[in-house]
Image (cartoon, coloured by chain):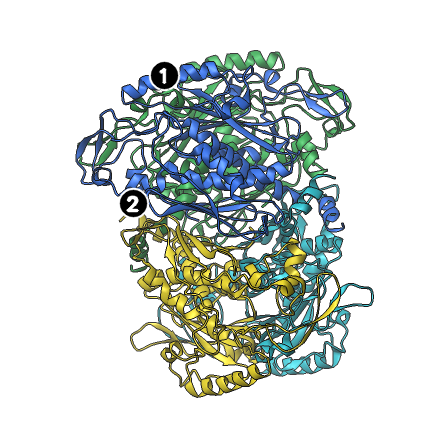
Chain colours: A blue, B green, C cyan, D yellow
Amino acid sequence: MAGSVFGKIFRISTWGESHGKGIGVVIDGCPAGLSLCEEDIQPYLDRRKPGRNEFATPRSESDTAEILSGVFEGVTTGTPISIAIMNKTQRSGDYSEIAQVYRPGHADYTFDQKYGIRDYRGGGRSSGRETAARVAAGAVAAKLLGEMGIAVNAYTLSIGDIRADVQNGDIALALSDPLCMPDSGASRRAQEYLRGLREKGDSAGGVVECVIKGIPAGLGETVFDKYDARLAQAVMSIGAVKGVEIGAGFEAAGKCGTEDNDPFLISADGTVTKGSNNSGGILGGMSDGISPVVVRAAFKATPSVSAAQRTVDKDGAEREIRIKGRHDPVIVPRAVVVVEAMAALVTADLLLENMAARLDGIKRFYTR
Amino acid sequence: MAGSVFGKIFRISTWGESHGKGIGVVIDGCPAGLSLCEEDIQPYLDRRKPGRNEFATPRSESDTAEILSGVFEGVTTGTPISIAIMNKTQRSGDYSEIAQVYRPGHADYTFDQKYGIRDYRGGGRSSGRETAARVAAGAVAAKLLGEMGIAVNAYTLSIGDIRADVQNGDIALALSDPLCMPDSGASRRAQEYLRGLREKGDSAGGVVECVIKGIPAGLGETVFDKYDARLAQAVMSIGAVKGVEIGAGFEAAGKCGTEDNDPFLISADGTVTKGSNNSGGILGGMSDGISPVVVRAAFKATPSVSAAQRTVDKDGAEREIRIKGRHDPVIVPRAVVVVEAMAALVTADLLLENMAARLDGIKRFYTR
Amino acid sequence: MAGSVFGKIFRISTWGESHGKGIGVVIDGCPAGLSLCEEDIQPYLDRRKPGRNEFATPRSESDTAEILSGVFEGVTTGTPISIAIMNKTQRSGDYSEIAQVYRPGHADYTFDQKYGIRDYRGGGRSSGRETAARVAAGAVAAKLLGEMGIAVNAYTLSIGDIRADVQNGDIALALSDPLCMPDSGASRRAQEYLRGLREKGDSAGGVVECVIKGIPAGLGETVFDKYDARLAQAVMSIGAVKGVEIGAGFEAAGKCGTEDNDPFLISADGTVTKGSNNSGGILGGMSDGISPVVVRAAFKATPSVSAAQRTVDKDGAEREIRIKGRHDPVIVPRAVVVVEAMAALVTADLLLENMAARLDGIKRFYTR
Amino acid sequence: MAGSVFGKIFRISTWGESHGKGIGVVIDGCPAGLSLCEEDIQPYLDRRKPGRNEFATPRSESDTAEILSGVFEGVTTGTPISIAIMNKTQRSGDYSEIAQVYRPGHADYTFDQKYGIRDYRGGGRSSGRETAARVAAGAVAAKLLGEMGIAVNAYTLSIGDIRADVQNGDIALALSDPLCMPDSGASRRAQEYLRGLREKGDSAGGVVECVIKGIPAGLGETVFDKYDARLAQAVMSIGAVKGVEIGAGFEAAGKCGTEDNDPFLISADGTVTKGSNNSGGILGGMSDGISPVVVRAAFKATPSVSAAQRTVDKDGAEREIRIKGRHDPVIVPRAVVVVEAMAALVTADLLLENMAARLDGIKRFYTR
């Protein structure tokens, strides 16, 4: 129950600290019969990997995933899939300051308050490195979803106040853009902005948008386990996320009912469609099977800044801290794939959960 | 797993439809020894009750809670607390249109897609009436939290574009304000705005803010069960919510690290305090025990509008619909106590979960 | 988490005390589309009802089930099914002794130790009356299983040392036999035995056997959620059960491998069959789809005996107690349907859980 | 949900196959502040290790545990503890027969039926090797329980029909006895019996008894999560277990109420005690805090026998099989520590769960 287990049917259990022996995940509940190998996972990890460009921490980690179980002759067997990413650089650097002085905006203080002990090396369990295990699991979920014709894609929507023009942008562009923006003009402006902040020892936040396409109607459970509610937990659980939106999100609060309601229409081929997608593809907590699901996450600025900050130490004295070393001036581009992973995990779980919804479906399943 | 169960230790299971025999909740996991009677629950239900003023649907329901189990001689026994709210008015009105024609912005279409059957009377299980069961359970959680010195308070922050001045407002005022705003000037302007919309057969949305005070440090589990992540699921699971924020929320995405980081300070009495609360009282997913937890929810406009809307029916034909009857022109004021209830449920659950975090605490507990 | 919730997909939450307002259950996760009405549930409750003959407590309770939600026009909607059984006789008898003096073999002492408070009227939550809620839920599970061609049948295998000859008996007979035995000769001897015990103010125990037929292969999850493991929890959770067996059970411990292993054979029609069923229809925790699942439960004697017993009271003084009133001289016949209900609940849950096991099944499900 | 996750607060997730890269476990929910190192775990694994004497399979595996996370400077941090046991001998032997022909009494057939694919090398996930991960986790649970003064000890009660005299035996003896019996006379007879069986290519079963001492009163949750119910699931989930008993177990079914009820007494020092322990330390599903908890598990004979057996192959043809290689002639002695591990895991989980039972305890906990 301590918080590192996620999902109900497609369930994952993650482990590991920033500067321990490694990190990893055990997936229990991945269906049998899925082709899977390390090459399916590595591209996802590479998108999260540090050191890819000037806007990411230069820590050198290959982040190589190894599948330890659950796959036989290249195919999943329905048994737990254990994936380990061993740390290459367990820097035994000088952690005397971080061990004593609480960094503002970080989890140092609350970890000590809750547990009375903390692996302070590189942030320990609260390091962003923890998300590599989510990404590895998310890659498996995405592979499963791909088999069902479901695609999950995220990108950087904004950094600071600089917002990408997604309407006229190209989502595919985001995969190669250094800031994962689907708008190269906005990306260039954001890069300038980040260079300026870095010079001042400061950092920026931003917004990630994630779009899920090809979802059948009816995913999500009514009341507490609505698709949007599960996405909200999944995305808010990523460190540094301070807000989550579905569809029109906070803008919906300012709209009238006649503006916000998406009209249902009949398309040329006779299927049901919608005139707009303010709902973000979800009504009453269930996917409508018509429009893509759209979720957005607001990330705060990287709290590790080299500018001087006021804080306190373990002994209750006020201190000034300047965080040393080079840190990500913005976490957003590396977080894009983390949002994608969490959305894939939720969607895979609900896809499996939904199979039990109707007696006719159950009968059809068992009378093949 | 179907979605009407919430929580891990303080766990609730809700049931009921809008126009069925009633609605209710079973709470499994409320600690023994809590004084509890119907009078503790009723004031919460009254805040959600329809028909209180011109801005709420005039349906006449007393919403009277009855405790059926789990309380003996006025005190909880640790066994399940069953609370029922029987429906007084099971209107056997004319539902032929709602049975056939999918209302835009409602769950009619997705319910049919998922289950193939739907209690369409008054929205059935997807009616806002479902939230009465949450509020009843939330009242019990709030009573428990009160015993621990924890207070959960929500209010209307904005309706449409009209925002309350909370800084100079009076939270207590919200309890008597017809729109639950802590700023009577803003409330008057919002009332005008709503009257105008109602005349046009339209509706409005808004934002609810909830503040939790008196929380010990360390509530919330790291990684997936962070306090903010659990709040996000809880609040997003309320029908019509399209966005959730913690602390600075989406504004944090536009701030620099040096602006957003809350400095730690030592207060006059030697305890640790903070210079600001952009984090919303949560760091690394755990309460800091210093600042209140602040969560906001964006509600879309009530989808039931009497203006004409385009839609389709069960037979796949395009239709025009005008939703009859008087509906809430805005759901926000009645939703305030629902947000409060969900925040209380999450907080109570994490309060209990946190007890297992440390060996020294466990030893102290068992060696009384 | 407090213990009154059971199941993962087909999940139930029970509530109620022996002499409170009533007892009941909420089922979350029953698939939509199942025909269901009170008449489906009542026959199950009638089999558990007190006062049916001289071997059951004469308490007069009609045990009438009322469905409060989740069923629309006679069909389940996929939303929670709330079933209430209101108590008719909330005897306000004299409970001063039971409130003070701990009855041996009962839960009075441990309830006080755990919770510090206890509804002592009629045993409160630890009363056998709690099982009526399980039976109501089990009736719904059995209806669902019936739709899939799965039948769950239990009967009394033995009372004291008197064992029914099941091989030559008639299972159908058990439904009308006063002791639910499928062997009228054994039943007559057991009735004599029970009359003798009752005269001495004593009571008897016995064994219930339950057979589940028509199960597809593959139900049950490997490792911790094996079919047999889930049955073991389900059956051991019934008050007074002290042992659970699958197939050859404890006898298997004395057999050699060559005796115990069930040979696989090819039957005349070319399908796989088995030469014996020592395994009780389960191998590696999964149903084999060939043989019935066989589970047995050992019930201790009713602890309520009128003979004098040594015990202690709340104040720590030794006392002698003679339990007044007429009690079941044996609980076994009334427990038969409870075992059946628990087996049905486990089987229904695993039936739904199993649908997510294989990618080919998932693909077939979604590409109808 | 697929079955390799166990526990609620002290929750484990196991992985690995017999002849894959390794096996392991992630523990989420172990409290912070527990001293822990590999040396705490290894002795438990050594008790389960193959090749210790003539009665165990001679496979050469060092079964060395490595802690990969969750421990910092020798102390648990409250974050997930990942333990890996890498396989040394991934024998690439000839598995053509086991891949094609279903071994009676094994899970080969049901695995294929459920998943359509199976890692057949050495039994894959259904191998007894899976239990090493349970034992590693159980060692951590046992260390935690030890800190609380709770001791869990198991031993071989019987092999075939040869039963140890536990009353006059010495439990400590079991740790050094080759069959883990606390009675050297019975052990010698059992050894003779096993040698005889082995010559005939046959195998034996037996019974393991486990005693848990030092438990506070009140562990276990009423209704479905009773201490005995959780133990029953835990123990029945071990491969080859066909029956579980608590206290007097199946014998209780033959006893009268006056025989079976354990009288409460006041001991010389004024505390409550009991005159017998037929209940096995549990009343109403909760530990009484007076007597040890006693649980017994019946193990069937090792299904791997070298004598000829009738069976079928994947293509639906009848076959004769003789299982090659040297196998354990009895699994019981190696299973003793597995039962101990499962009992420790359940007890640790319920110890933590119980902390939330009472308001006065919660208040005391938070107002230190």
Give the percent coordinates (x, y) of residue D257. 54, 77
| Residue under numbered circle 1 | A193
**Tag of residue A118:** 2
In the image, is D106 to the left or to the right of A115? right
The residue shown at (46%, 32%) is A47
**Tag of residue C207:** none
CB under 8 Å between callouts 1 and 2?
no
Query: Is residue C215 in sight in this rendering?
Result: yes
Residue D39 versus residue A180 in the image, above or below: below
The residue shown at (50%, 35%) is A43
Q: Chain of mark 2?
A: A
Residue B74 versus residue C56 in the image, above or below: above
Find numbered disc 1 in the image and state the secondary structure of the residue it sits on.
Answer: helix
Find numbered disc 2 in the image and state the secondary structure of the residue it sits on.
Answer: loop
User: Callout 1, which amino acid?
Assistant: Tyr
Give the percent coordinates (x, y) of residue C113. 40, 62
Q: Quadrant of residue D3?
A: bottom right
Give the percent coordinates (x, y) of residue D179. 45, 79
